[in-house]
Amino acid sequence: MNIPFLDLGRMEASLKHRLKERFSDLIDAGIFSGGKEVEALENSVCDFLKSSFSIPCANGTDALELALRALGIGSGDEVIVPAMTWVSTAEAVVMVGAKPVFWDTDEEGLLRKDWGKAVVSKSKAVIPVHLYGKMVDMKELDEKAKSLGLFVIEDAAQAFGAFQYGRAAGTWGDVGCLSFYPTKNIGALGEAGMCLTQEAELAKKIRLLLNHGQPIRDQHELVGRNSRIDTLQAAFLNVMLKDFKENQQKRKTIAKRYLDAFSGIEELGLPSGILEEDHNAHLFVIQTERRDELKAFLAEHSIGTAIHYPRILPKMKPFFSEGLYKNARSLADRCLSIPLNPFIQPIEVETVVEVIKKFFR
Ligand SMILES: Cc1ncc(COP(=O)(O)O)c(C=O)c1O
């Protein structure tokens, strides 16, 4: 039995059929940029996440860059970024001409609570990342950022559908950024992303920035760019959204099975809070000193795994920064993501459980 980490080709037949139908409708309609599907996506996400504004764009990396630009962050500014995240979080900061200032995470990869110590007069914003789908304590972070006069840009790329005190990931910050990369809990059949904001002025600015600064065709109010979402991707996401809750249920069921099965293994660190509402169970990340050995053992048994992520940003050439980043480093050395997605079958989950138990026996 071959158990891939994630195989998107395994989508249910009924979903494939609905996607193909929507594709065919769009070809007949001949609308490939903007249009009703994009509007429908905006409305559905606003409803579901209880956000005042949702602005679809080309991908999650652009969403971060658009957020930074809309907030006026650029050359000479500093932005606090966790040392452990996907590279986009820091990349976007560099792309607008600002400097990412890295701060260590807690043991599970969320920005350490004492990040305020990194604040200097040049600091303009902080970017909490809801890594693996688990939300940073946003009430606390928001209050601290406000008291320090900083903007908050939430990197909620991995946390679609997680809620804290009834408020969705991405709706706490001045701007929240989502990714609909295909592997995400709700993914397009290509690239797509979104900015969320509760402020009309910011929403307007982001919309302008992602469409060449045009409020209407051929009227350019500022220097922007093209980061529009494809209509096709918006349409696919509208189809995918219908299955989101059911898929989340499947993720939580698998997460619970793993937690129950592995709770007695002392050598193994398990994700905390993964069954809670403020975690969308995007990834099931275990931690062990023998990570590479375990990964190889699972591969020998035809079980796919992934490492999110093997290196921390301040130790990468383009972002090099002095510092220990002890927790982030330890996570990078020890983390292993095991298969958790709506497509894996119960028998496959049991096989993963058995093989991991065998390794630690
Ligand atoms: C934490 C984080 N930030 C940003 C992004 C960027 O999203 P995208 O791949 O859609 O550009 C991702 C997606 O991989 C991510 O995981």
Image: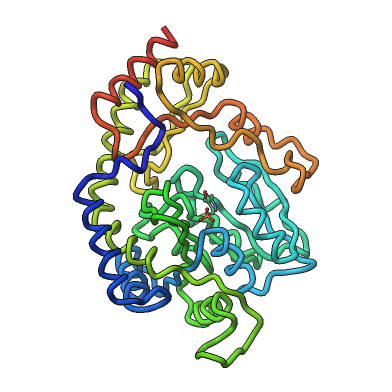
Assign the N terminus to one quadrant of the image.
top left
Q: Is residue 163 visible?
A: no
Residue at far bottom of view: 219
Figure quadrant of residue 3: top left
Quarter of the image for the C terminus: give it. Answer: top left
Q: Which of 21 and 346 is in front in this view?
A: 21
Q: Position of residue 303 (x, y in %)?
A: 40, 23
In this picture, is 278 found above or below 124?
above
| Residue positioned 48% across, 54% down in the render | 157
- Residue in the foreground of this view, choosing between 58 and 172: 58
Residue 17 image position (x, y, % from top left): 21, 54
Viewer-proximal residue among 165 and 211: 211
Residue 340 vertical position relative to residue 217 in the rendered view, above or below: above
Q: Which residue is drawn at 64% across and 85% down?
A: 222
Tally the marks. 0
- 310 left or right, relative to 117: left
Instruction: Name the residue located 39 percent from the left edge and 59 percent from the top edge.
Output: 168
Whole-percent x, y for residue 108 in the image: 53, 36
Q: In which quarter of the image is residue 142?
A: bottom right
As drawn, which residue projects farthest toward the top?
A: 361
339 on left or right of 126: left
The percent position of residue 162, horizontal first and vertical second, equals 38, 52
Q: Is residue 151 left or right of residue 355?
A: right
Colour setting: rainbow
Q: Which residue is drawn at 54% across and 29% down?
A: 335
Q: In which quarter of the image is residue 291?
A: top right
Q: Residue furthest left?
A: 14
